[in-house]
Structure formats: structure tokens, C-alpha cells
Amino acid sequence: MPPNQPSILHGPSAPVPVSLPFGDLLARHARERGSNPAVISHHQDVTLTFQKLHERSDMLASAFLASGVNKGEKVAIMLGSRTEYLEAFFACAKIGAALVLLNYAFVFEEIVSTLTPVEPKLLILSPVVGRFKFTHFMDKLSTRLASLQALVIVNPEVDTSFHLGHKMVEYTSFLARGQHNPLPKLNVSPHDIVNVQFTSGSTGIPKAAALSHYNIMNCGRYISKQIFGLIIGICTSAWSGSAVVFPSDIFNATAAVECIEKYQCTGIYGVTTMFIEEMAAANFSKTDRSSLKFGIMAGSAMPPDLLERVIKTFPVPRLYTNWGMTELSSITTMTHHTDPMHKRIYTAGRLFPGFVAKIVEPNTGRVLPWGKKGEIVISGYGVMQGGYLNNAEKTAETLKQHVEDLQDNGVGAIDSQGNLRTWLHTGDEGFLDDDGYFVITGRIKDIIIRGGENITPVEIEERLFSHPAIVQASVIGVPSPRLGEDVAAFVELRSGHAAPTDAELQDWVRQKLSRFKVPRYFWWIGGQDERVPRAWPKTASGKLRKPDLRVVAKGLLSTMISQRNAQSVVIQARL
């Protein structure tokens, strides 16, 4: 691209987005492939065909209506990967209600604070999800959440000490309410909100992103078309008519590897840390994974050699990397398996059909020249149609119309609906390379400003990843009275290696990067220092939570300063 070409990029014009309610898609699969498996839940030992899923979600939808859940209202759910989750999703879709997804790692006060403004009529949950136990506060939920008419309890027998309390009903009993009530035909629009997802919280307090049928339907469709039917989740498998496999209620590397062989899975989806843990699983070398054809690796920065290792050792012949976010209904850019390896490792791929992207100056919104780093802003079918629920201020900060688009700047001011384009300001920093691939350099909020120098954590993380003794790394900024911020790194030791010293790691980084980018502090995840977490703090989707690491770092630095001051007092006293 010429150096002065503006950073404006249009995705392919075809295929055009479809307008279809999600419930209609399941009904079509029930007619055309009703006996095919839709979901295989390994840990439940349950398989539902498309016909059975259609029938059970119809029954649950009728039960919702009988319980006073009407079009436009909310049903919250806090489960791991279970068949009931899919039933609830499609039941809400069929009656025009929205399913609100809760992170099962939330504690009581987080559940209350996130659900209070959303006002769900029902909350579907299990007393235990993986290592997370909720029995000690379930009774209090109905009193703290005024909108709740009932708590629908899935799998109550998982905890023998648990007993149904006030406003609680067991899931199968609740489902039976819809058994003899045929589901009426309801007028559900593709632009109705069907799903509320809280932002992953990897950079702060979660916000409730409201997604429509149109948003997530087309997300699943384009991912499916890009990778020829890869199973990456509910939306894509629902579009392609393939089965989704739930190895465990929350991620378990051993179970995932086992299920690839047992069910002859053809596709695999996960964030970077999941692939690392799967290849380190004890049963990895003992299983046959030759059925795998496709894979998507999402999430945080990856070691440069990880993609090649997954392709060769899993093996996954067609492995794709990507970029997206909750507010964009998932993935917006993706590499292709025919792309050169360096493109798949160092870029997030090309823009999907139906999207337009700009790279802009964060504070002014000015479109930057091609190849310059700036904030990525996106317009298109995936942009959350409902904004952030009950948060007009954050919605206005994130979703904007650019009046300058009306000038002839190559954007195309009017969208496919005939309206002035709405742009999502993603908060992600990146640039377009010479071939039109997106290179993501990190979150703007994660950029470290050390003595006036801007530092992108991802380049330091990639350098640390390349050290033979390090399996995972996360770099953050920490307060510095002299420099404003300094660089700190949390690292995890690779099994079978001795831990390098701080000085050795600093020298390793210094060999490839400027001196001002070299971390001052290193802390080992799972190491001997009990103040450092034993495991990486993660969101429910498996992404590393940098805010949690910043809190840990603040405590560690505070202790270091206190110890230093105490030593100074002792020395002065001796003098």
C-alpha cells in the first residue's frame, strides 16, 4: 500500500448477511437431519439429536412462557458446558427472550452487581460447576435480586448437602411445566436481542453486551464458511448442522484430549493456554487425534513456535488464528490455512465479509495512514445491536457514528440497513500490513508508559515465550515513582527446566529489544513465593486476567517497599 493510503479496509461483499431468528435454524435442522447428534456431553453421558434438542427447547420455551417470561425479557444462566445450556439458549431464541450468560467464577457480590441492572426473571444454575461451589449463597440470591421469580436448579444431586430452598425449582420439574403446552408461533425478529454476554473482564469491570439473532447468526455462518464446518461453538455448529462435544463442564485438558479420540472430533477450538495445557496433558501421547482436520486458536499472545507445534503434534492440518471480541459477536478477522506461516503466527488474518475497519488516532478519531498503529474501529453485522444494557454512558463511549463518513473518504457512509454507519471503538491497538492483514499489538489500556516511552506488552511476552524455560508469560505495567510506570512480568516455568534468574531473563529480553522494554520485576506463577498465584487467573473463556495480575503485583511491590523501609530504619538505628 502507498504510504499515504488511509487505513480503511472493506471485507468481501459476498456472501451478504442473512436475517433469520435462531430458533428457525434449529427447526430446519430438526426437519432435515433430525436423527443426527446436535450435542454430545461426555461428562453427562448424554447425547441429544437435533430433533430431541428441538423438542426439549420447545418444552422449555413453553415453561418459560408459563412462568411469565415474555418477549424482550431476560433469563440468566450460570452453568458449565451442559446440554441444559443449549436447551435454554434455543428456548429463549424461540420466544424472543434473551439468555444472560454469567461467568461461573463470579462470587456472590459479582453475581448480584451484574444481574441487578439486567433484571432477569429466572436464574438457571447448578450448585457446583467444576471447582466452583455456590450452595452457601444460593438462598440469598432470591432476596437480593428483586426481579427473580425463581431459581431453576440443574443437577442438584451433585451436592448431597444441598436442599431446594425459597423460590427454587428443580430443572426437570420446571421443564415439565411446558410438556402439555404446545409452543405458540411468536413474532420473533432477527434484530431482537437473544443473548447478553458480559465482557470477559480481562481489562476491568464486565459490561453487559446485548447481541441480536442477526449478530450471532451471521457470526456463526461466516466462521463456518471460512473453515468449512469447523465446530467452534454453539453458533457455528448450529449453522453448519454439526455436533458440538462438551468434554467437561469447565475446561479440562485431559478430558478434551480423551474426547478427540473417543468421538473422532474433526475440529477443535480453544484459547492459547488451552492448547498449551492439552499438549502437556498426561494422556496426550497415548491418544489418537488423527481425526482432527480443523482448529481455531484464539485469545492472548502466543509463543512463536506454538502454532507450528499444534499443527504438527496434535496434529491439526488446518489451524486458524483470529481476532474478535464480545461486542463484535465473536470473531471478525481470521487467517486461512493456506496463508504463509508467518502470517498465521504474527497476524490476526483478514476481515470477514460484511465488515468495514478503520485504524484511527485514539483521542481524535483521525484515520491514520496505512501501516500506522492506532485504535481499531469496526462497523458491520457483528457490532452489538443492543449496546451495553442499562449503561448509556459506556455505550456512547464505545458505539459512535462518524459524521466525517459523509465526506468521500472511501468508507461508505451508509450501512446495509440504510443508516449512517455505527462504529465500535474496540480499545484494541493494531495496524494493517502491506497485504491487508490485521496485526494486533495489544489493548490500548495495557500499553505501558515508562519514562515517556510507549511499550506494548505483547512484544515482550513474545520474547519471553521464546525462552526454552518459559511456557507462559504476561507483562504488565506497575507504578514507579521515578518513571511513572515500570515493566513487570509474570512467568510460568516449563516442566523439566530450572528457573533462570531475573538477570538471565533480563539479558534474554535485552538481546532482541530496547533496554527500556526490559522487565524490572519477574514473578513466577506456581513458584515458591506463596504471595504469587499457583495458577494463572483466567476468565471463563480461558483468557488471562491482567487486572488480577496488577492487583497481585501491587501487593508484592507494597511488601517490597515495606521491607526496604524496615531495613533502612534498622540500618539508621545501628548508625
Image: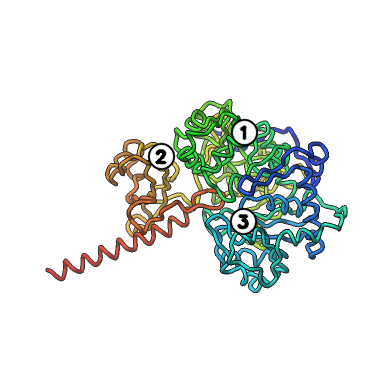
Would you name the residue on which mark 1 appears? 264
93 relative to 310, above or below: below
Q: Nearer the viewer, residue 350 or 172?
A: 172
Residue 22 seen in this snapshot: no
Quadrant position of the C terminus in the picture: bottom left
**Image location (x, y in percent) of residue 172:** 73, 59
Which label lies toward us, 1 or 3? Answer: 1
> What is the secondary structure assignment of the residue under circle 3?
strand
> What is the secondary structure assignment of the residue under circle 1?
loop
Which label lies toward us, 2 or 1? Answer: 1
Q: Amino acid at mark 1?
A: Gln
Would you name the residue on which mark 3 appears? 198
- Mark 2–mark 1 distance (CA, rounded to whole Å): 32 Å
Relative to 387, is 546 on the left or the right? Answer: left
Relative to 2, is 482 on the left or the right? Answer: left
Quadrant position of the N terminus in the picture: top right
**Image location (x, y in percent) of residue 551:** 43, 60
124 relative to 8, above or below: below
> What is the secondary structure assignment of the residue under circle 2?
helix
Q: Residue at x 39, y 49 (%)?
A: 490
Relative to 377, is 407 on the left or the right? Answer: right
Would you name the residue on which mark 2 appears? 465
Of pointers 1 and 3, the one earlier in the residue sequence = 3
